[in-house]
Image (tube, rainbow, N blue to C red):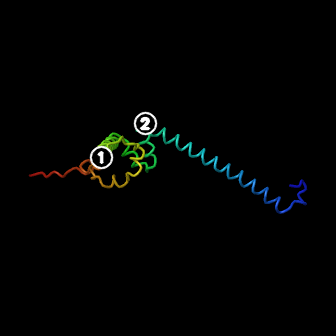
């Protein structure tokens, strides 16, 4: 490759671009590997404690729903343990499913909508007490 940019041939320029492109790809691959490593660390940290995984999942919900489901960790953790027991019984192997992977497909909006108004916290007798008839 010549030191004179004016006297640079097309082949020299293509060789230089090839070296730059391969270096750029290596940098991108290194960044992607670093991002995957960070995601794996976060995932491992969340899976280390069921409460962390549950709170992270609730953080994706709108505020009213996250408030409603905030006290229901025990309910969902018991369902998770029941499913693990069923998986172990059926497959005769130790299950590898994490609590986070159990929570991901749950549609909290749909579960909330399926509850009765009373279970959702709407108690009409508090806001509109029953009428009393007075016999004269």
Specify the label residue 49 is tagged with: 2
Q: Is residue 51 above or below residue 133?
A: above
Q: Quadrant of the N terminus?
A: bottom right
Count of numbered circles on the image: 2
In the image: residue 60, left or right of residue 12: left
In the image: residue 48, left or right of residue 27: left
CA distance for labels 2 and 1 = 26 Å
Task: Categorize mark 2 by other alpha carbons within 10 Å: few (<14), some (14-19), many (20+).
Answer: few
Number of the front mark, 2 or 1: 1
Q: Is residue 110 above or below residue 83?
A: below
Pick whichever, 48 or 115, lies toward us. Answer: 48
Q: Position of residue 121 (x, y in %)?
A: 30, 48
Pick whichever, 44 or 13, lies toward us. Answer: 13
Q: Position of residue 99 (x, y in %)?
A: 40, 43
Q: Position of residue 75 (x, y in %)?
A: 32, 42
Give the residue furthest to the bottom.
Answer: 10
């Amino acid at each position: 490759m010549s030191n004179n940019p004016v006297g640079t041939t097309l082949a020299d320029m293509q060789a230089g671009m090839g070296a730059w492109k391969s270096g750029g790809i290596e940098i991108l691959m290194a960044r992607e590997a670093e991002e995957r490593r960070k995601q794996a660390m976060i995932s491992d940290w969340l899976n280390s404690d069921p409460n962390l995984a549950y709170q992270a999942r609730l953080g994706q919900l709108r505020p009213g729903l996250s408030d409603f489901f905030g006290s229901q960790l025990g309910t969902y953790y018991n369902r998770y343990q029941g499913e693990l027991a069923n998986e172990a019984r059926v497959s005769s192997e130790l299950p590898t499913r994490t609590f986070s992977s159990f929570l991901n497909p749950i549609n909290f909006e749909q579960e909330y909508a399926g509850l009765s108004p009373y279970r959702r916290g709407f108690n009409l007798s508090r806001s509109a007490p029953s009428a009393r008839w007075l016999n004269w």
